[in-house]
Each structure stands twice: as C-alpha cells, then as structure tokens.
Amino acid sequence: MVYSRLDPHPAFKAIEFELDTYDKRGTTSPVVRDPVAGVTADPLMIFSTSQANIAALSYFLAMGWSAGDTALPFVLLDDPIQSMDDVNVLGFADLCRHLRQDRQLTISTHERRFAGLLERKLAPRTAAESTRAIKFVAWDRSGPVVEEQSVESQHLLDTIRVVQMAD
C-alpha cells in the first residue's frame, strides 16, 4: 500500500520481498515488479536515488505496519525526503496523514518548505488529534534554543452551506 501510494516509477508499480537463506540465516531482499511486462528487478540496480529512497521508506513503513499491535506506537523519520522531487514530497506528505492515524509520527527536517507543508497537511482535523511544531532557532551556551507551538486545528466548527444562485 505504501509503495503504490507514493508511486515512484512509471513501470515498476509493485514492490515485493524475496525470502532466501544465506549462511544458514534468513534474508529478505526487495524486488520491484512491472505487472504489464512481467519483469522483476532489484530496485537498487535500476532506480534513481529518489526512487530507491522511496522503496526503502516503503519497506520500513510496511514492516512497522505488518507488526500490528506489537509494533512500537510511534514512527520517527529523520529527513525522509532526501533526493525526492516535488511530486514525491507531496505524496509523502499525504501519506504522513495516514501514518499518524495508527502511530505517533515524529519527523525531523531541515527543509523549511517541507516543514511548512507538513504543518498544513498534519494540522488536526478532529478534536482528538494534535500537532506540535518544534523549530530549532539557535544555539547558545546553555544549549539549543527552540520554539514550540501547537498547530491550529483545521476542522470546521460551524457547518458551511453552499447556496447556488439562480440565473
């Protein structure tokens, strides 16, 4: 689901995992598949850096989701958009909204535009949700100086009615 939602490649639309044994130990390797041509490949051999990062991120998130209730209740991602183009960054920001439904999501980034995008995309939509933005401002002798703020809710308190004007 994660990989297909980000859709990083025009032909290789699915990611799978091959299980193998190496030196009496089980190993798992990612394989991407072109369902139309029936071709499989190693993503590290044919993908760009951005596409490979998306495949790795998909693998990591899928492993966390597959653990279900036994998984850690949070996800911490450090600068997850390395080498991603703008379209993939937007797709990842949308994916983050789904990630936060099951886990506490913490993302660190040095990209101001991405941080602003996440503040908008991850703004609370219900009263049960909350989003905090912690920004590094400076460093002084006492340590880091940060600004912390709650992101304003995006849910509507009043019903909005749309009235169509008659000609």
Image (spheres, helix red, strand yellow):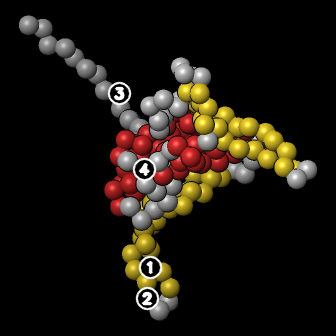
Tag 1: amino acid = Val
Gap in angstroms between the C-alphas marked 4 and 2: 33 Å
Q: Residue at x 35, y 61 (%)?
A: 112
Q: Earlier in the sequence, mark 1 or mark 3?
A: 1
Q: Residue at x 44, y 40 (%)?
A: 91
Tag 3: amino acid = Thr
The C terminus: image quadrant: top left
Task: Specify the label residue 140 is tagged with.
Answer: 2
Tag 2: amino acid = Asp
Q: Which residue is mark 3?
A: 159
Q: Which residue is mark 1?
A: 145
Q: Earlier in the sequence, mark 3 or mark 2?
A: 2
Q: Where residue 121 sits in the image (x, y, percent)?
A: 41, 44
Gap in angstroms between the C-alphas marked 1 and 2: 7 Å
Q: In the current view of this chain or complex, which residue is farthest to the right?
A: 24
Task: Specify the label residue 84 is tagged with.
Answer: 4
Q: Earlier in the sequence, mark 4 or mark 2?
A: 4
Q: Residues within 10 Å of mark 4 (few under 14, many from 20)?
A: some
Q: Element at badge 1?
A: strand
Tag 4: amino acid = Met
